[in-house]
């Protein structure tokens, strides 16, 4: 079995602690990165501010039919952009995480805010950390930092945060400490469930399992009434000798790719 590399999680390109993301200035044309101009363009249904244009579009003007630049992010180089149901997230190449859109159940990780967040807003919780990847579920969010630590926030109605001590929702990020020593390689959010793949090839799941999307087999392994798993549990059957390297989550389904591409 392949040895887990010391730098299992690669930080974003050009990630330097001394580079500060500050979107409070009026300078929009320059990028602190040498990797690109950082422009992000969004379009489509704009209610709840999910497009990041600074407007909570009304139903009569909700659709933006042509790509429009998100000016707030124009001076950064964006490494990753993720679209959820009614919220959006992005990562800069300096490892900073921004979210915006509908703030219900704390899924933006910005604390207890009321109303939509209409411009990209940095999660100060990660000010001293480098975020490498982010995923969005229907009402929850997950990210991974460069020290292989996984964080979740938002709704925990079905146990999708993998934090059994949280019974409703979590408005700010919290580490999934049960996976700290597992060395997370990839992860994914389904509609109401979460998947995590380790460098060892092991796969863990939690959350809503009504349709078998957790891969845990017999429902007896899940909470009897809600058919939900409130903590990350390893999938023990089904993968055989295949070493999984990446996982994927749909609304009520899951997928995985093995090292051999099967």
Image: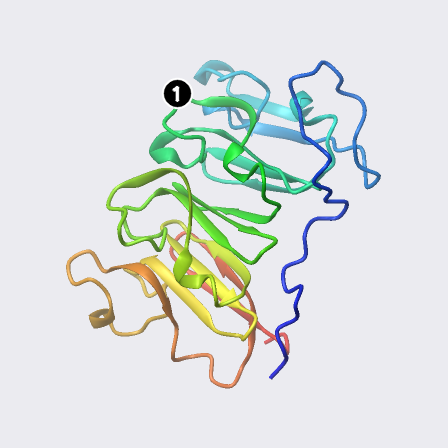
* Residue 138 visible, this orientation: no
The residue that appears at 30% across and 53% down in the rendered structure is 159
In this view, the residue in front, 188 or 67, is 188
Query: Which coloring applies here?
Result: rainbow
Compared across the picture, whether 158 is left or right of 253 comes to left
Residue 19 position within the rendered picture, expressed as x and y whole percent measured from the top left: 73, 34
Task: Indicate the quadrant containing the C terminus: top left, top right, bottom left or bottom right.
Answer: bottom right
Task: Work out whether 179 lies above or below 139.
Answer: below
Residue 246 appears in the figure: yes
- Location of residue 224 in the rendering, given as x and y in whole percent from the top left corner: 16, 63
Residue 95 falls in image quadrant: top right
- Residue at 36 percent across and 31 percent down: it is 104
Residue placed farthest to the right in the image? 34
In percent of the image, x 25 and y 74: which residue is there? Answer: 218
Estimate the x, y position of residue 3 in percent, counting from the top left.
Answer: 63, 78
Crowd rating for badge 1 (residues with CA inside 10 Å; few <14, some 14–19, many 20+): few
Residue toward you, 206 or 17: 17
Q: Residue 140: x percent and y percent? A: 40, 43
Q: Is residue 94 left or right of residue 205?
A: right
* Mark 1 lies on residue: 115
Which quadrant, please, contains the N terminus? bottom right
Q: Is residue 179 left or right of residue 78?
A: left
- The residue positioned farthest toward the left in the image shown: 225
| On screen, residue 202 above or below 75 | below
Q: Is residue 13 above or below residue 83?
A: below
Q: Residue at x 53, y 66 (%)?
A: 183
Q: For the residue labelled by badge 1, is the local secondary structure a helix, a strand or a loop? A: loop
């Amino acid at each position: 079995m392949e040895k887990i590399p010391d730098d299992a999680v690669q930080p974003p390109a050009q990630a330097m602690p001394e580079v500060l993301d500050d979107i409070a200035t009026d300078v929009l044309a320059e990028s602190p990165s040498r990797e690109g101009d950082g422009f992000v363009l969004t379009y489509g249904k704009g209610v709840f501010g999910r497009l990041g244009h600074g407007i909570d579009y009304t139903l009569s003007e909700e659709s933006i039919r042509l790509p429009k630049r998100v000016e707030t992010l124009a001076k950064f180089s964006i490494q990753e952009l993720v679209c959820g149901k009614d919220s959006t997230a992005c990562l800069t190449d300096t490892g900073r995480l921004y979210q915006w859109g509908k703030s219900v159940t704390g899924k933006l990780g910005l604390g207890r805010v009321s109303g939509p967040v209409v411009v990209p807003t940095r999660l100060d919780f990660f000010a001293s950390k480098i975020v490498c990847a982010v995923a969005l579920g229907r009402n929850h969010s997950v990210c991974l930092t460069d020290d292989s630590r996984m964080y979740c926030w938002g709704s925990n109605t079905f146990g999708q945060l993998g934090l059994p001590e949280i019974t409703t929702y979590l408005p700010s990020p919290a580490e999934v400490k049960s996976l700290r020593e597992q060395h997370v390689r990839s992860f994914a959010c389904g509609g109401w469930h979460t998947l995590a793949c380790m460098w060892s090839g092991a796969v863990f799941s939690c959350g809503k399992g009504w349709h078998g999307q957790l891969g845990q087999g017999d429902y007896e392994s899940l909470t009897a009434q809600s058919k939900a798993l409130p903590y990350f549990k390893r999938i023990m059957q089904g993968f055989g000798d295949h070493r999984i390297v990446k996982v994927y989550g749909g609304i009520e389904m899951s997928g995985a790719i093995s090292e051999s591409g099967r």
